């Protein structure tokens, strides 16, 4: 069975931990969009790994990892990650395939990202400054450089010259020299050569051979270019539709979709966040949840679970189930509010609006569930979850319309509760707990 894992909120939901947990049940883990703006954190045996580009399945020796055509790849960042894994004794040789159709992030994309953010002033997006947006702009503008172009010296030189000239015009200086960029890129290209391939063909062969695929989404639904809080989004399709375009597989290849959501909500960067907690309450949640970006270290904005927003994710992704992460962060509260609607003048909206102007005029409607004082932290069986936590999860299921499959109660793989055994054994063959 092939399963897609997607972020059901604004990213940072804990997808890395869940992908790592279930990865041994799959032969292939394939990323389909984004780039090294992602930071999938995995804790194994007391070690912390932050995977930015390489799929989170890489920590399991038998798993093949794929970087799809839908990604934008910064070769320098990719090799830094490969080298970090090598230091930890994890080798990617023979297990990593990079799509020949993936687009490249070059040093001028990073500069353009910073320059355009500076140019936006108060309307800035708050990007990760990794060059993600400018690389996708070049892709849509049909002037991007793809992995397959790395072997074509004349295309490479021409594209890099053009890109550097554009950067220098924008910056008003000529501190970046295209010859340096070409030289660095050519060295990295040589190193990449053994890993380049046609991902669509590789996946088709794997599926024909009965091998199970895990599609790994990055960022989250509300950062999706089409379905998120545009323009405060990333530049790729973080929803499940991106798996088809970003890997070259048909929609019937995805047999089930699993959405990952925190028990509350966080967001990094600018943009709307209806259930956000400002002031000391938000600070307290941030401190308790250690909500600082895995990639940029930026403090994350924190707020309550937003059922309107997660229902939007359930619909646009066709989610079959949710995983609720960081449940333990809510331990010890007297009451736990859940956003259930947006009051907008005389109306109460129960669907996430497209217009941010409209959203700005809304205030969230909360209902408050009783808190629980016995800890969920480190709990590993559904029966051991405090009654208040169980009631909270049941309410999330009612409000979102999908079952909660797993609950994460801590950073380690083992700190996981299987809440829906029948579904877990259908999808993963059981034995997760
Ligand atoms: P970009 O992807 O760097 O262009 O940033 C666009 C927006 O997406 C910004 O608000 C970022 O903070 C956000 N973003 C990008 N990647 C992630 C992620 O992996 N987790 C959370 N937010 C992200």
Image: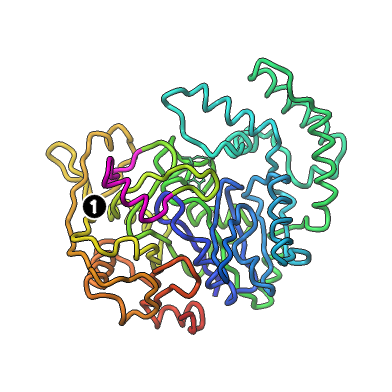
Q: List the single residue furthest toward the right.
A: 153
Q: Residue at 41% of width from left, 78% of height from top?
A: 423
- Mark 1, secondary structure of its residue: strand
Q: Is residue 249 magenta?
A: no
At which x and y percent is residue 57?
61, 66
Q: Quadrant of residue 336?
A: bottom left
Instruction: Give the left or right position of residue 352, taking residue 93 as reference.
Output: left
Q: Quadrant of the N terminus?
A: bottom right
Furthest residue in direction top, as rendered: 172
Q: Is residue 89 left or right of residue 18?
A: right
Residue 274 horizontal side relative to residue 433, left or right: left
- Rendered residue at 66%/56% (across/down): 67
Magenta-colored span: 272-291
The image position of residue 118, as x and y in percent, is: 52, 24
Against 135, residue 198 (above or below) is below
Q: Position of residue 12 (x, y in %)?
A: 46, 53
Residue at 75% of width from left, 46% of height from top? Answer: 147
Indicate yes or no whether the magenta region holds residue 275. Answer: yes
- The colour scheme used here is rainbow
In front: 51, or 365?
51
Residue at coordinates 64% horizontally, 29% vertically from top-left? 111
**Quarter of the rendering containing residue 196:** bottom right
Q: Could you say where residue 420 lies in the image, as x and y percent from the top left?
A: 37, 78
Q: Dot 1: within a 10 Å radius of its alpha carbon, few (fewer than 14), some, or many (20 or more) residues?
A: many
Residue that mark 1 sits on: 339
261 and 247: which one is in front? 261
Quarter holding the C terminus? Answer: bottom left
Taking the view exactly as shown, the residue that stands out farthest to the left is 346
């Amino acid at each position: 069975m092939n399963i897609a894992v997607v972020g059901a909120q604004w990213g940072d939901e804990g997808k890395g931990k869940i992908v790592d947990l279930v990865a041994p049940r799959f032969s292939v883990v394939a990323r389909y969009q984004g780039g090294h703006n992602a930071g999938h954190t995995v804790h194994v045996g007391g070690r912390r790994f932050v995977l930015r580009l390489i799929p989170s399945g890489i920590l399991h020796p038998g798993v093949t990892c794929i970087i799809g055509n839908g990604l934008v790849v910064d070769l320098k960042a990719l090799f830094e990650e490969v080298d970090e894994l090598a230091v930890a004794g994890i080798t990617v040789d023979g297990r990593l395939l990079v799509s020949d159709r993936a687009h490249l992030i070059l040093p001028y994309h990073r500069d353009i990202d910073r320059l355009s953010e500076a140019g936006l002033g108060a309307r800035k997006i708050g990007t990760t400054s990794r060059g993600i947006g400018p690389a996708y702009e070049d892709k849509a503008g049909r002037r991007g450089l793809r992995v397959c172009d790395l072997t074509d010296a004349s295309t490479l030189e021409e594209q890099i010259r053009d890109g550097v000239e554009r950067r220098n015009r924008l910056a008003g200086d000529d501190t970046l020299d295209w010859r340096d960029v070409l030289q660095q890129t050519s060295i990295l290209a040589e190193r990449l050569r053994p890993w380049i391939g046609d991902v669509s063909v590789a996946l088709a062969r794997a599926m024909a051979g009965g091998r199970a695929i895990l599609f790994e989404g990055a960022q989250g639904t509300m950062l999706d270019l089409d379905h998120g809080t545009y323009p405060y989004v990333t530049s790729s399709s973080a929803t499940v539709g991106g798996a088809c375009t970003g890997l070259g597989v048909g929609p019937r290849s995805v047999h089930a979709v699993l959405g990952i959501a925190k028990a509350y909500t966080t967001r990094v960067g600018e943009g709307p966040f209806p259930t956000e907690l400002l002031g000391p309450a938000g600070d307290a949640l941030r401190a308790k949840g250690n909500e600082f970006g895995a990639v940029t270290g930026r403090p994350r904005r924190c707020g309550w679970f937003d059922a309107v927003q997660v229902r939007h994710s359930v619909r646009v992704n066709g989610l079959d189930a949710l995983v609720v992460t960081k449940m333990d962060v809510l331990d010890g509260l007297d009451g736990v509010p859940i956003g259930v609607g947006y009051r907008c003048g005389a109306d109460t909206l129960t669907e996430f609006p497209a217009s941010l102007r409209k959203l700005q005029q809304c205030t969230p409607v909360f209902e408050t569930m009783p808190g629980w004082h016995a800890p969920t932290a480190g709990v590993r069986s559904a029966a051991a979850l405090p009654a208040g936590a169980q009631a909270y999860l049941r309410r999330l299921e009612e409000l979102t319309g999908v079952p909660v499959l797993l609950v994460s109660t801590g950073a380690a793989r083992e700190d996981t509760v299987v809440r829906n055994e029948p579904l877990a054994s259908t999808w993963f063959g059981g034995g997760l707990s």
